[in-house]
Image (cartoon, rainbow, N blue to C red):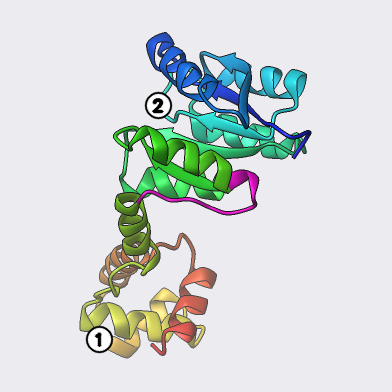
Amino acid sequence: MSGERIRVVLVDDHAVIRAGLAQLLAGTDDIEVVGEADNGATALEVVRATAPDVVLMDLQMPGVDGVTATRNIRAAGLSADVLVLTSYSDSERIVGALDAGAVGYLLKDAEPDDVLHGIRAVSRGESPIHPRAARALLGARSGPAPVQLTSRESEVLALVREGLANKQIARRLGISERTVKAHLTSAFARIGVTDRTQAALWAERNGI
């Protein structure tokens, strides 16, 4: 931290929300607002100019969103920690924000004291996460559902793993080369790969 008080920058495209947050923080003895930005594009400039300890970051903003702004702050090597304060609790946004470098995630329906506690927690090196966001995050981090391949797709992938070309696979399985290509296209989409090498590696890792 820089000094005794926790220096905070507010980033939100709604002036009313920024004003409410500024009033809330002004009522404390250990937190002060040193800057504001009304969009993600100017957030980096404000953070660079004011050197805050914590950036209270909204996510949904016109132009540059909060995830990108967070990533820009991290990429610039600035020491400020980003604490997200948003209305969204879907796992995609939470994972995106944390992967971009945010250290905490609060929701705007939190109690005022929760926001203050969150800022103080971040300044102590902790990572506060709203319970609803934490549940969504745990669900996202538990991993995707297992890939369901048809028996024929599995057979084709196994032969790709062996290094066989489409014509050889067609001959081995007694099907046309066009059918092999169709099975490969479907299998590639299911397992999330784009070429035979990736497919062969996936098949090896998954025991196909």
Where does the N terminus fall, quadrant-wise? Answer: top right
Q: Position of residue 78 (x, y in %)?
A: 75, 35
Q: In the picture shown, does residue 132 fall above or below 158? A: above
Q: In the picture shown, does residue 10 fall above or below 128? A: above
Specify the segment rendered in magenta: 122-130
Q: Residues within 10 Å of mark 2 (few under 14, many from 20)?
A: some
Extreme-left residue of the structure: 150
Q: Position of residue 114 (x, y in %)?
A: 40, 41
Residue topped by disc 1: 174
Residue topped by disc 2: 60
* Mark found first going from the N terminus, 2 or 1: 2
Q: CA distance from mark 2 to mark 1?
A: 54 Å
Q: Residue 60's image quarter?
A: top left
Going 21% across and 78% down the picture, which residue do you hit?
A: 150
Q: Position of residue 19 (x, y in %)?
A: 45, 12
What amino acid type is highlighted by mark number 1?
Gly
Where does the C terminus fall, quadrant-wise? Answer: bottom left
Q: Nearer the viewer, residue 174 or 77?
A: 77
Residue 7 located within the stretch drawn in magenta: no
Q: Is residue 101 visible?
A: no
What amino acid type is highlighted by mark number 2?
Gln
Q: Is residue 198 visible?
A: yes
Q: What is the number of callouts on the image?
A: 2
Task: Report whether 98 appears left or right of 137.
Answer: right
Q: Residue 100's image quarter?
A: top right
Q: Nearer the viewer, residue 98 or 17?
A: 17
Q: Main secondary structure of the magenta part?
A: loop
Going 52% across and 16% down the picture, which residue do you hit?
A: 39
Going 29% across and 75% down the picture, which residue do you hit?
A: 146
The kind of secondary structure element at disc 1 is loop
